[in-house]
Image (cartoon, helix red, strand yellow):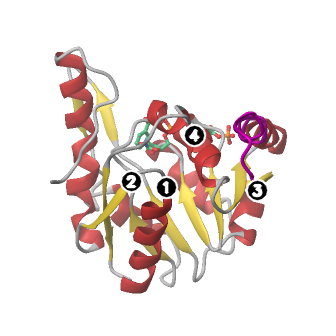
Amino acid sequence: MRVGIVGGTGDIGEGMAMRLSRIMDVCVGSRDPSKAQDTCNTCLLSAKECGVDCSVKAGTNQEVVEQSDLIILAIPFKHLKATIEGINGWEGKIVVSPVNPMERRDSFVYTPPQEGSAALYLQKILPPSTRICTAFNNIAGNRWCAISEELEYSVPVCGDDMEAKQIVMDLVDRISSLKAFDAGPLSSSHIVESITPLLLNVARFNKMKDVGIRFV
Ligand SMILES: NC(=O)c1ccc[n+]([C@@H]2O[C@H](COP(=O)([O-])OP(=O)(O)OC[C@H]3O[C@@H](n4cnc5c(N)ncnc54)[C@H](OP(=O)(O)O)[C@@H]3O)[C@@H](O)[C@H]2O)c1
């Protein structure tokens, strides 16, 4: 299975690319392929330093969607619409949304669209055959990039296509010490997305860094 990361050059995208390319084939996407190549070079150098294999290649976001079976949308909510509409070939693909619509005011606030969540918004703008799941919403970009450290978090996964959800949960369980949990249908995604502003507020008001979740 090839995993593609649309927006793979960003804060979570690059760390995801580093970790995933050590366990599977990864395609890093960007609006600017040279930027995607820079991220690939970072992955290759980091793997070489650790003496491990790495399978990663760069492309445009369009190429990533064409060449991947599962696509992670590592894009800020405000750029989702333009990004999705600028790409063809979503039909039948598994699309994973780590997207959290939120704003920083006096504190961090969850600001979902009128559909109720980023995931349900995606369901509205993607073709009906797209197999959308919510995952990876609550892990800080810094943690993804700290490649020598274990990721000891729980990852709630939402989705309506049970086969796609199982594929995503199996993927989660292959990454570091992450553990996937079925968090229900796609319509429950707002609960998962809204945890992230809570984590950021807890971090901010308690002088903590990169707060995450673990179900025990
Ligand atoms: N950062 C975190 O700690 C974190 C944690 C959990 C979930 N998330 C979620 O993950 C998603 C990505 O977050 P991030 O912090 O990684 O985002 P980011 O670094 O701000 O941006 C990610 C990528 O989006 C692309 N992008 C930027 N402006 C764009 C535009 N106008 N049109 C199209 N693409 C544009 C860029 O890729 P190119 O310039 O290469 O095209 C950029 O590298 C968000 O939805 C966020 O809610 C983030």
Tell me if residue 109 comes above or below residue 98 in the rendering: above
The residue carrying mark 1 is 175
Outermost residue on the top side: it is 207
Q: Earlier in the sequence, mark 1 or mark 4?
A: 4
Q: Residue at x 20, y 55 (%)?
A: 191
Viewer-proximal residue, 180 or 60? 180
Instruction: Please state, as top left, top right, bottom left or bottom right, where the N terminus lies in the image.
Output: bottom right
Distance from mark 1 CB to nearest ligand 1 atom below 8 Å: no
Horizontal side of residue 96 vs 153, given as left or right: right
> Label 4 belongs to which residue?
15
Give the CA separation, mark 2 to mark 4: 14 Å
The local crowd at label 3, few if under 14, some if 14 to 19, many if 20 or more residues have their Cα within 10 Å, is some
* Residues at circles 2 and 1 in contact by the CB criterion of under 8 Å: yes
Residue 170 visible: yes
The front one of 76 and 68 is: 68
In the picture, the disc for residue 55 is 3
Q: Quadrant of ligand 1?
A: top right
From the viewer's perspective, is residue 177 above or below residue 94? above
Q: In which quarter of the image is residue 147?
A: top right
Magenta residues span 42-54
Coordinates of residue 91 in the picture (x, y in percent): 60, 81
Left or right for 91, reference 118: right
* Label 2 residue SS: loop
Local packing at callout 1 (Cα closer than 10 Å; few below 14, some 14-19, many 20+) is some
- Mark 2 or 4, nearer chain start: 4
- Image position, residue 107 (x, y; %): 21, 23
Q: Residues within 10 Å of mark 2 (few under 14, many from 20)?
A: many
Q: Choose mark 1 or mark 4, whichever is in front.
A: 1
What x and y, as percent, mark residue 119?
37, 62
